[in-house]
Image (tube, rainbow, N blue to C red):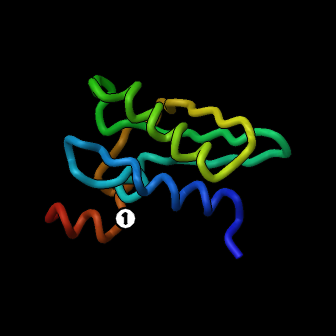
């Protein structure tokens, strides 16, 4: 049986970074999913600090997460710099990295 964090992570695979064409989980942009009694806090980063789609992607992450939990969902943009080695191996292979 999947934990709530695993269910949320699976739902977040439907959020696509349109510039790269891969989902935010495969890209390693979801850095943490913290589940407490009444809230879920998702920490995500962006491939670029100047990403023009930042607010749209955060909204998409929020919407997808709220579809699989009844808890209050908070999406926090982390300050960690994204690096290609954060990606899942399949994503690196797909991009030839």
Q: Residue at x 69, y 47 (%)?
A: 34
Quickly name the residue at label 1: 88
Give the side of residue 81 with respect to residue 76, left or right: left
- Residue 86 vs 49, above or below: the answer is below
Give the side of residue 51 with respect to residue 62, left or right: left
Q: Residue at x 56, y 39 (%)?
A: 43
Give the side of residue 11 with respect to residue 55, left or right: right
Residue 50: x, y in percent?
Answer: 28, 23
Q: Nearer the viewer, residue 85 or 6?
A: 6
Q: Residue at x 59, y 55 (%)?
A: 8
> Residue farthest to the left?
96
The number of numbered badges drawn on the structure is 1
Give the position of the N terminus as an image quadrant. Answer: bottom right
Q: Residue at x 41, y 25 (%)?
A: 55
Q: Nearer the viewer, residue 88 or 75?
A: 75
Q: Residue 51: name its quadrant.
A: top left
> Residue farthest to the right?
37
Q: Nearer the viewer, residue 63 or 23?
A: 63
Residue 20: x, y in percent?
Answer: 21, 47
Query: How packed is label 1: few (under 14 Cα within 10 Å), some, or many (20 or more)?
Result: few
Give the position of the C terminus as an image quadrant. Answer: bottom left
Residue 38: x, y in percent?
Answer: 82, 40
Q: Nearer the viewer, residue 17 or 44?
A: 17
Give the side of residue 86 with respect to residue 32, left or right: left
Element type at marker 1?
A: loop
């Amino acid at each position: 049986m999947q934990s709530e964090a695993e269910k949320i992570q699976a739902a977040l695979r439907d959020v696509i970074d349109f510039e790269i064409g891969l989902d935010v989980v495969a890209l390693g942009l979801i850095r943490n999913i913290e589940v407490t009694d009444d809230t879920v806090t998702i920490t995500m980063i962006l491939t670029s600090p100047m990403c023009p789609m930042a607010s749209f992607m955060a909204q998409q992450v929020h919407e997808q997460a709220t579809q699989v939990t009844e808890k209050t969902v908070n999406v926090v943009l982390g300050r960690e710099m994204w690096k290609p080695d954060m990606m899942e191996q399949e994503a690196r292979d797909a991009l030839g990295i």
